[in-house]
Image (tube, rainbow, N blue to C red):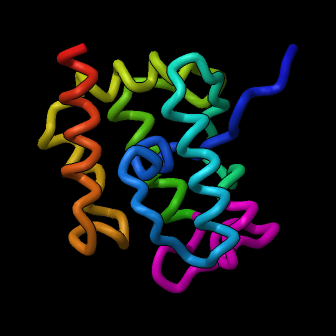
Amino acid sequence: MTPPDARLRGHHLLCLLAFSGDGYSDDFVAQFARLEAIYRSPDSIIEVLISADDACAACPHGSPDGCRSAVDGPEQAVKELDRAVLDLLAIEPGRHRAADLHARLARAEHQAVHATCKACSWYGKTNCQELILEFTRQRKSS
């Protein structure tokens, strides 16, 4: 079996669609930009996880035990956010085509997206929910 194009934890399936160049470190920002390009490509194969992923590998708060961010952690809280996004998309961890993930997100209710994002430390600090919803509107109209 060929390796996936990217390994992404659940909540990054939303974050990558709203990425605006902010992040925890220069390495993290560069890695997130690379992953954003992969995830936005409809034919990419994404391994969806509820654990550390390719973005976490470049995060200064990452550890072998998972997230140690004073703001975003502990790891259990991040896993709960991952699970909430998988529930929003009605998927399980595993391999998914990016276009299928995008289509599922486009079918999600806007209020459900906002409710899911409320657990994130970035909620209200950026316009990420609006960027995610704009992406879904574009998918619905195409």
Which residue sits furthest bottom?
Answer: 70
The prevailing secondary structure element of the residues shown in magenta is loop
Q: Position of residue 77 (x, y in %)?
A: 49, 65
* Magenta-drawn segment: 56-75
Picture quarter containing residue 107? top left
Relative horizontal placement of residue 67, taking residue 71 as reference (left or right): right
Which residue sits furthest left?
Answer: 111
Q: Position of residue 26 (x, y in %)?
A: 64, 75
Nearest the viewer among 99 and 89 is 99
Q: Position of residue 118 (x, y in %)?
A: 25, 61
Q: Position of residue 94 (x, y in %)?
A: 65, 26
Q: Quadrant of the C terminus?
A: top left
Q: Quadrant of the N terminus?
A: top right
Picture quarter containing residue 20? bottom left
Query: Which residue sits at x=37%, y=28%?
Result: 89
Relative horizontal placement of residue 104, taking residue 92 as reference (left or right): left
Nearest the viewer among 104 and 138 is 138
Picture quarter containing residue 48? top right
In the image, residue 1 sits, relative to residue 112, either above or below, namely above
Query: Which residue sits at x=45%, y=16%?
Result: 100
Nearest the viewer among 106 and 42 is 42
Relative horizontal placement of residue 1, taking residue 7 as reference (left or right): right
Is residue 74 located in the magenta-colored stretch of the structure? yes
Relative horizontal placement of residue 19, taking residue 27 as reference (left or right): left
Query: Which residue sits at x=28%, y=35%?
Result: 135
Is residue 46 located in the magenta-colored stretch of the structure? no
Query: Which residue sits at x=62%, y=23%?
Result: 44
Counting the numbered discs, the total is 0
